[in-house]
């Protein structure tokens, strides 16, 4: 069986209303993406080390429109179903969020976590039950349960999808958790435990020795077992085009991109753009 997780970091940077009220101790507001994105990344790392394939459908901190996210999710779903057959692959989508009520710390604001699914979705409810089971075991928060709600991300995705609300941005106690690294890791781990249980896979605690081995072998194979020197079938055309045009050197197509490598690629694009402008003149 092939297991695939599509992770979504929710709202991107600078979205209206997607922030806490002003927090005096910080001297600023906290953007929702400051919680969503790192948790989504940590969740992906947890899932990968269990041999599950992971894709980010809202890469980076910029805001990716909802339609683009679900279009990408459905493209990946269809790709894996065509490649392995519907009976041999299980694909789920998990979207991370932080809730809001009235945008102010004043009054008796609600608090707590909830897992949202498309109304009537039996498989999504089962996934939500698994994830909710673990989310309520960590930091003491109100568990608001499974909420059936007609949301674009779960409605337009053709597979099994859930959206988690991991607290309220306008509840001061929970707002202050958003930047807490331990809380972020906890939410990522608990969500991963729930997804793995849904898949029928056992969660494995990280051992220090395993972390060292993973780092040593990172140049050749990532922790999911993929050979990073072999380009994925779905990316072959684009990979050939960018290497033919000199933006990448053709090595390690499946590896992570460092800031240094990104700087080289951006500079190559910049030079090409300046040359085009010169030719146009």
Image: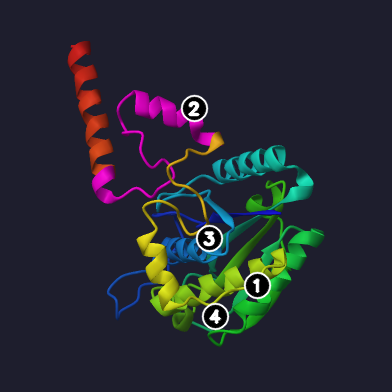
Tell me the element at label 2: helix
Determine which residue is flagged by label 4.
109
Q: Earlier in the sequence, mark 4 or mark 1?
A: 4
Q: Which mark is residue 237?
A: 2
Tell whether position 63 is magenta.
Answer: no
Residue at 23% x, 39% y is 264
Give, as a single range, the part of the protein colored magenta.
234-261
- Give the CA distance from mark 3 to mark 1: 13 Å
Q: Which mark is residue 48?
A: 3
Q: Badge 1: how crowded within 10 Å, few (<14), some, or many (20+)?
A: few
**In the rendered image, the vertical position of residue 63 relative to residue 108, given as above or below:** above
Question: Viewer-proximal residue, 169 or 270?
Answer: 270
Residue at 65% x, 38% y is 79
Residue at 68% x, 38% y is 83
Q: Which mark is residue 189?
A: none
Q: Earlier in the sequence, mark 3 or mark 1?
A: 3
User: Residue 50, how many percent across, how many down?
Assistant: 57, 64
């Amino acid at each position: 069986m092939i297991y695939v997780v599509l992770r979504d970091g929710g709202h991107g940077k600078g979205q209206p209303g997607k922030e806490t009220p002003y927090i005096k101790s910080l001297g600023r507001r906290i953007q929702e993406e400051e919680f969503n994105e790192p948790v989504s990344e940590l969740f992906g790392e947890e899932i990968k080390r269990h041999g599950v394939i992971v894709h980010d459908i809202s890469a980076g901190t910029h805001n990716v429109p909802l339609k683009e996210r679900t279009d990408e999710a459905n493209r990946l779903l269809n790709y894996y179903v065509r490649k392995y057959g519907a009976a041999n692959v299980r694909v789920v989508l998990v979207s991370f969020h932080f809730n809001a009520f009235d945008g102010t710390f004043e009054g008796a604001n609600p608090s707590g976590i909830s897992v949202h699914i498309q109304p009537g979705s039996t498989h999504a409810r089962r996934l939500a039950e698994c994830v909710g089971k673990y989310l309520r075991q960590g930091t003491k928060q109100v568990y608001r349960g499974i909420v059936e709600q007609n949301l674009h991300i779960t409605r337009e995705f053709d597979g099994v999808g859930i959206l988690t609300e991991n607290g309220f941005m306008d509840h001061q106690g929970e707002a202050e958790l958003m930047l807490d690294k331990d809380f972020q890791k906890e939410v990522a781990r608990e969500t991963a435990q729930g997804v793995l249980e849904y898949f029928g896979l056992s969660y494995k605690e990280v051992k220090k020795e395993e972390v060292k081995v993973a780092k040593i072998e990172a140049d050749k194979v990532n922790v999911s077992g993929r050979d990073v020197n072999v380009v994925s079938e779905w990316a072959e055309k684009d990979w050939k085009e960018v290497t033919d045009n000199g933006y990448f050197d053709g090595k390690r197509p499946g590896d992570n991109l460092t800031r240094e490598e990104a700087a080289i690629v951006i500079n190559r694009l910049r030079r090409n753009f300046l040359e085009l402008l010169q030719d146009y003149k």
